[in-house]
Amino acid sequence: MTLPIDRLEQTLRKTGVSRFMEHFETLFPETHLKDLVVDAVGPGREIVINGRRVVNFGCDSFLGLDQHPRLIEAIETSVRHWGTHNGSSRIFASVRANVQAEEILAQWLGTEATLIYPSVTLANLGAIPGLVGKADVIVYDEFAHNSIQEGIRIAKANGTRSAMFRHNDPADLERQLHALRPYRFALIAVDGVYSMTGDLPPLRDFQAIALQHDAVLYIDDAHGTGVLGEHGRGTVLESLGSYDNTLVVGSLSKGFSCLGGFIGCSRSFQRQLKIRSNSYIFGGPVPPPYLDAIITATEILLSSEYPLLRARLKTYVDRLTTGCREMGLTVLGGATPIVSVFIGDEADTLQVGKLLFDAGYYVQSVTFPAVPYHGGVIRIQVNANHTSAQIEGLLDALGETMTTLLARSSRRAA
């Protein structure tokens, strides 16, 4: 007897994205390098995958705080104090560490308040539909993060109209707002840093448009949190000089090396987010040990240690981007610790990732549908606790890999 769940699985396997991914796995079984299992971590940025020890350039713990003694001690101490979990939706009760973490985050960020969610994805999925109604509209950058676009889909299902504008194009944003009239309010949703390219949005232009068109800026600055701006506050304050007319989303799992996401806002707006964000109301909280770690991480960002971490990180990013360009490679990004090297062809992109892995360096081979078709990139994530020797080793391996790839392409052409 065939069960309905079996028929459901077969139906799902026939859909476009499933067929595409299974086709890729069949075509490139040795170079796909997805769904990997890490068996050990350390020392430094080394990891063990399938018995092979490699240097990890696929980690978004940009400041290396995941191995910082103070964060490890904070988590260990907090487990003994709070246990592993407080076991309650925050709509009923929050542990004191949650309130303290939000207060110190607000102090660091420069907003009146913050609200912590279990992840940036859940922040976007909960906040965006909660901010708008049937009389409102949402306009979003075509390359806005998937979690923003998923939040918009929920809002659309609730009756909110939306439109997409061309990437980082103020004129097209203004055209879309005109076309959507009449509306009560508009939400303009963008990334603070676009993770695949390192692009920064023209926030000043967007803010001017927002103020002229009854709109609020909603900025997912997950990839700028901790690594851009003074004390790692991100792109918004540095670009705009204030948080007026903005809602800022930040990550606690990248530069902070903890867990969760947050929204920076006024105290009164924090209350509205608590009332209207379903992922806050019906989702579980960040476990207490990570809340104490967030407090400690924020203290580090506000301390004299932070400029040293940031300077080391910048040195490594600059060396990597310069070295890649000296080899004639097309580098996307460089303003943040995410350095994407353009490869293009899907098979070539996966092959470069596998050759680098065999040489002892793990990077992320990113292909369609995460990037445009034939827009494959090698996504390299630099951390402050890499070493100069590891950066130089990766550059040497990348040079040898590109030489090998070019030779193979020449043989195919012949």
Image (cartoon, grey):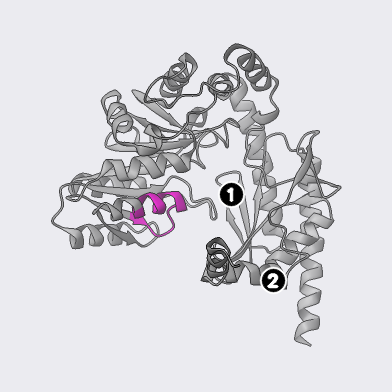
First-in-chain label (2 vs 1): 1
Place residue 384 in its image quadrant: top right
Classify 10 Å Cα crowding around label 2: few (below 14), some (14-19), many (20 and above).
Answer: some
Kindly give the residue lying farthest to the front in the view shown. 1
Residue at 19 percent across and 51 percent down: it is 134
Is residue 353 depicted above or below 204 in this figure? Answer: below
Q: Nearer the viewer, mark 2 or mark 1?
A: 2
SS at circle 2 = helix
The structure residue drawn at horizontal position 49% and vertical position 41%, both measured from the top left corner, is 222
Identify the amino acid type marked 2: Ala
How crowded pointer 1 is (Cα within 10 Å; few <14, some 14-19, many 20+) is rated as: some
Instruction: Provide the residue designation for mark 2.
Output: 347
Horizontal arrangement in the rendering, residue 138 relative to residue 347 (left or right): left
User: Which secondary structure lies at badge 1?
Assistant: loop
Q: Is residue 121 above or below residue 284?
A: below
**Residue 72 image point, x, y percent:** 68, 22
Q: Is residue 77 above or below residue 362?
A: above
- Percent coordinates x, y for residue 170 in the rendering: 31, 56
- Specify the quadrant of the image occupied by residue 352: bottom right
For this orientation, the residue located farthest to the right is 51
Q: Picture quarter containing residue 357?
A: bottom right
Q: Quadrant of the N terminus?
A: bottom right
Q: Magenta part of the protein: which range?
A: 140-153
Q: Is residue 341 left or right of residue 15?
A: right
Q: Can you tell which mark lies on residue 334? A: 1
